[in-house]
Image (cartoon, rainbow, N blue to C red):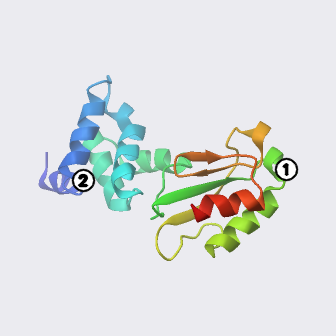
Amino acid sequence: MSAVGQNLINALSDEEVAEIEEEITHLNDRKAAAIDALKIVQKHRRYVSDESLQAIANLLGMSYAELDGIATFYTLIFRKPVGEKVILLCDGVSCWIMGSDNVREKVKSKLQIQMGETTPDGKYTLLPMTCLGDCDHAPAMLVGEDVYRDLTDKRIDEIFDE
């Protein structure tokens, strides 16, 4: 491996490289670990920086453009810094019919941020999501890994006052 290639891999922590290499052992092709590698780095850093993306691409034997195409295709791979918890607010048709506009305004007001922003304390980032697949309990949102359903103003207060 060239010195440039080694420096790019050094942009990843030893732990990240070890986890990615472990994923690769289960696959026939290093490139097949692309999504898992992105998720591993994001788990450690909350997003995938340009430098990290280049390092992952180098480790997997891919071009930056190939891996960036994968990273930007998936909405849950974050390419810019996000808060400790990402709030994905469903804006699908079912949620919209059931009042997601009101829920969105309540969440924005409660957190004092707009869609796409992060709270000043770095705790939350608020993002839209096309569909959470919880249409029978609309409106819904995902906060970190927790799904909240049948949202109302009162429920929003309860969630964020916990």
106 lies above or below 32: below
Q: Residue 17: which quarter of the image? A: top left
Q: Which residue is mark 2?
A: 12
Count every numbered label the image shows and give the total: 2
Identify the residue at image location x=56%, y=60%. 162
User: Hey, what amino acid is under mark 1?
Assistant: Met
Identify the residue at image location x=68%, y=64%. 157
Q: Which residue is mark 1?
A: 98
Q: Considering depth in this image, is 159 or 69 the residue closer to the camera?
A: 159
Percent position of residue 87, x then y: 59, 57
119 lies above or below 67: below
Q: Is 49 left or right of 161, judged from the image as shown?
A: left
Q: Earlier in the sequence, mark 1 or mark 2?
A: 2
User: Hey, what amino acid is under mark 2?
Assistant: Leu
Percent position of residue 84, x then y: 45, 61
Percent position of residue 49, x then y: 38, 60
Q: Considering depth in this image, is 101 or 146 the residue closer to the camera?
A: 146
Kindly report the distance in space between the C-alpha atoms of the residues bearing marks 1 and 2: 44 Å
Helix, strand, or loop for circle 2? loop
Helix, strand, or loop for circle 1? loop
Q: Residues within 10 Å of mark 1 (few under 14, many from 20)?
A: some
59 lies above or below 116: above
